[in-house]
Each structure stands twice: as structure tokens, then as C-alpha cells.
Image (cartoon, rainbow, N blue to C red):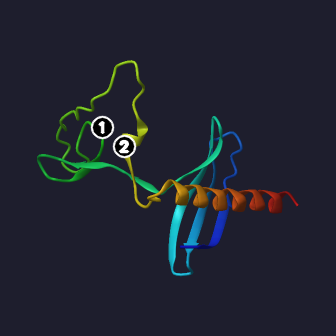
Amino acid sequence: MEITEVRVVLKDSPDKKLKAYATVTFDNVFVVRNIKVIEGTTGLFIAMPSRKVKHPCPKCSFKNELRSKYCNQCAAALPVEAIPQRMEEPVNSQSEHKDIAHPITQQFREYLQKRVLEAYDQEKNRIKA
């Protein structure tokens, strides 16, 4: 599978960790949107598109975001979700999101990240010029 196009949209706020969004086309037939370019502690990396995990209300079955205290549909109190974790560790934000699309192999993840970050650098340089 080849990446045939990468489009990058830079974000304006320089002090934030989110630097850009990318849209990647594979073999001119499949598109993945909302790949995020993020500034981490060791440099830039990509994060795949994701959505917040939702759980149904036991009373009305409306799907509410994880850790909601009350149902957004019927206002019933929601049960507290028991998430096993050690007390000294911070809450893992990954448990609140689930990837919509993601690479299966490390080799393809590295290829995808390389292509997206190259396009990000090109877009930054184009804007500066």
C-alpha cells in the first residue's frame, strides 16, 4: 500500500501541543482524515483519528461519555465506572478514546509518520516563504 497524497493544515496556536491535522490518501482510493501532528517531549509524532468512548445509561440507554456523572438524555445519575489503576499514576486519557483507524504493523506506522512529518515540514516552510 502506497501513500499517494498527504495534505497538512497547520494550527495557529504556537504554544499548544497540537501542531497540525493531516489527511492521507492511500493508493488514490482511500482517505484517512484528522491525523494529528503533536509536539511531544521527544519531538513530533502523529496520533490517529479517534473518538471518545461512550457508555449507555442504564435507565434510558442513551450513550454518554465515559466518566459522566449524569445522563445527558434523562438526567439520571450514572454508575461510577471502575477503572483499575494505581493511585500514584495519573488518569490515562487513552482509556477515554478509541482509534477509528490505525496501522497494524510498526513498519507501516513508521512509514506513515515519516510521510506525514515530511509533509508537515514542507507546509511549514511554504508558509514561511
The part of the image, by quadrant, that contains residue 42 is top right
Q: Which residue is mark 2?
A: 96
Amino acid type, residue under disc 2 in the picture: Glu
Numbered badge on residue 8: none
What is the x, y in percent for residue 109?
A: 54, 56
What residue is drawn where x is 82% and y is 58%?
Answer: 125
Residue ranking furthest to the left: 59
> Which amino acid is tagged 1?
Arg
Give the residue drawn at x 51%, y 81%. 29
Q: What whole-number distance in Å separates the C-alpha atoms at marks 1 and 2?
A: 9 Å
Which quarter of the image is occupied by the C terminus?
bottom right
Q: State yes or no: discs 1 and 2 in contact (Cβ < 8 Å).
A: yes
Percent position (x, y) of residue 77? 18, 37
**Is residue 45 found left or right of 77 in the rendered image?**
right
Numbered mark located on residue 67 in the image: 1
Name the residue at 58% across, 61% down: 112
The picture places residue 86, in percent across and down from the top left corner, at: 33, 22
Q: Along the line of sight, which residue is nearer the eye, 88 or 55?
A: 88
Vertical position of residue 12 compared to residue 89: above or below: below
